[in-house]
Image: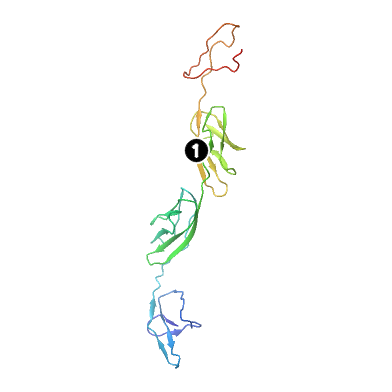
Amino acid sequence: WRDWSSDVCSSDLTGATNATYTATVAHTTYYRANVATTNSSFTESTAGAKLLFTGIYPTAIAGNTNVCVGQSTLLSDAIVVGYWTSINTSIATVGYATGLLGGVVAGTTTISYTLTTGCGIFTTVTINPLPSAIGGTLNVCVGQTTTLVDGGGGTWTSSNPGLASVTPGPPGGLVTGIVAGAPVITYTLPTTGCYIMTTMTVNPLPAPITGASSLCTGTTTTLNDAVPGGVWSSSTTTV
């Protein structure tokens, strides 16, 4: 094989004597093969092939290549005249012009970035699974507690600790109602950072009970509460 920078003169490529030759093109270059017959030392050159070096090629893809199912992150390249594609859109999608990567289901796939010249670069992305759905009672009264559960090993947080606090403890997150409201409780996996959320309802207590707090045996009295619609009960009906 021979190469040259213009279609005028050429020189042999050292060691390039096989039927095929793989070239790394760093500038516009012509290539031509010299073929010798088996019964003669005569050498005939083939027609030249011109490989055009455009000088524009993608750089390394930048951005987070790990994303959770249902979430997104932005990929980018220093050369902004290309387009993005996903090899498997059932695992991850990517915006054709934006590079916005979206996780569909857990798995890995390849994302490519291709310039208008046809030059491209690839990267592997990992789509991580979400935690399982949060289980437990999703409402609690002010001053009371309830336990939420998930797969274990993650961390629990409250969007508004002034409404409800959550602390880790077996078998899950112990939620304490503080003020009536609807804070969001989040459970986050430690390795991937994938998370799942649920809304917790903190219900207000009834108003203080009013009326006589003591009475004689065989007599009656009426107790009242400012919040109607409740049900009255006694802890000891024999008394």
Q: How many marks?
A: 1
| In this view, 108 is above or below 173 | below
Q: Position of residue 160 (x, y in %)?
A: 51, 35
Q: Residue 239 is drawn in which quadrant?
A: top right
Report the residue marked by disc 1. 198
For the N terminus, the image quarter is: bottom left
Indicate the position of residue 31 as horizontal and vertical percent values.
41, 80
Q: Quadrant of residue 174?
A: top right
Residue 58 in view of the camera = no
Label 1 is placed on what type of residue? Answer: Thr
Is any atom of residue 201 visible in this view?
yes
| Residue drawn at 40 percent across, 88 percent down | 44
Instruction: Decide: is 139 above or below 61.
Output: above
How are the residues colored? rainbow
Specify the farthest residue to the front. Answer: 238
Closest to the observer, 5 or 39: 39
| Residue under the image location 45 percent in, 64 percent down | 121
Q: Element at badge 1? A: strand
